[in-house]
Image: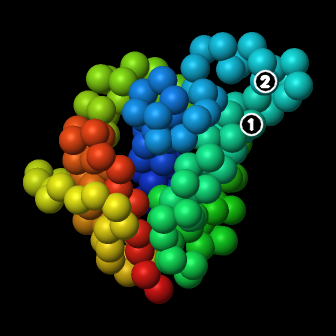
């Protein structure tokens, strides 16, 4: 994977993670990106509350996707280990803080930001949706297809689980 796509992938993960939470589309029952969550997390994780937010959302989204997809497939919230490590490292940098701070905390603005990451047209799909091969993860077309699939699902109040095969 080309490293230049990691920030976009992180942005996509954060947008979908935020939109999937309880207050937006309620795909998973968490509220890590609500304002009140920082008040809860900061006393416990004083130096790493942003990382705790990220990993809390990530695990909730990962669980839901894993329940609907086959073992061995990859999805936005479960990528190859080296990519996961790279994303984890970025989250802890100034770049990661900047990307996280730019994710809108309002449903409509987040949908608009997601739309900016998509290709022009994406077919609507429900449930597991094959997007391509994991070796093509660095391709802008794959990232756009994943973003478009989620945007379509959120727009139609449906759940979809785009995945990549090895």
On the picture, is 119 further left or further right than 39?
Answer: left
Residue 63 is situated, as x and y percent measured from the top left of the image, at: 61, 56
The residue labelled by disc 1 is 52
Q: For marks 2 and 1, give the CA distance.
A: 7 Å
- Crowdedness near tag 2: few (<14), some (14–19) or many (≥20) residues, C-alpha within 10 Å: some
Q: Is residue 105 visible?
A: yes
State the colouring used for the structure image. Answer: rainbow
Badges 2 and 1: C-beta atoms under 8 Å apart? Answer: yes
Q: Secondary structure at mark 1?
A: helix
Q: Residue at x 85, y 29 (%)?
A: 45
Q: Secondary structure at mark 2?
A: helix
Residue 72, located in which quarter of the rendered image? bottom right
As drawn, 150 above or below 145: above
Residue 40 is situated, as x and y percent measured from the top left of the image, at: 78, 18
The residue labelled by disc 2 is 41
Residue 114 is situated, as x and y percent measured from the top left of the image, at: 31, 40
Q: Residue at x 38, y 81 (%)?
A: 133
- Crowdedness near tag 1: few (<14), some (14–19) or many (≥20) residues, C-alpha within 10 Å: some
Give the number of the disc on residue 100: none
On the picture, is 99 further left or further right than 142?
Answer: right
As drawn, 83 above or below 158: below
As drawn, 66 above or below 99: below
């Amino acid at each position: 994977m080309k490293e230049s796509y990691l920030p976009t992938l992180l942005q996509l993960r954060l947008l979908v993670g935020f939109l999937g939470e309880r207050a937006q589309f309620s795909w998973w029952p968490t509220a890590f990106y609500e304002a009140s969550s920082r008040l809860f997390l900061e006393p416990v994780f004083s130096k790493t509350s942003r990382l705790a937010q990220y990993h809390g959302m990530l695990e909730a989204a990962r669980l839901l996707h894993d329940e609907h997809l086959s073992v061995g497939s990859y999805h936005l919230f479960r990528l190859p280990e080296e990519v996961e490590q790279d994303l984890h490292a970025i989250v802890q940098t100034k770049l990661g803080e900047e990307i996280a701070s730019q994710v809108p905390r309002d449903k409509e603005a987040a949908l608009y930001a997601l739309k900016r990451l998509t290709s022009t047209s994406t077919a609507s799909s429900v449930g597991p949706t094959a997007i391509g091969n994991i070796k093509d993860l660095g391709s802008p077309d794959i990232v756009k297809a994943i973003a478009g699939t989620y945007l379509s699902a959120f727009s139609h109040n449906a759940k979809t689980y785009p995945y990549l095969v090895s």
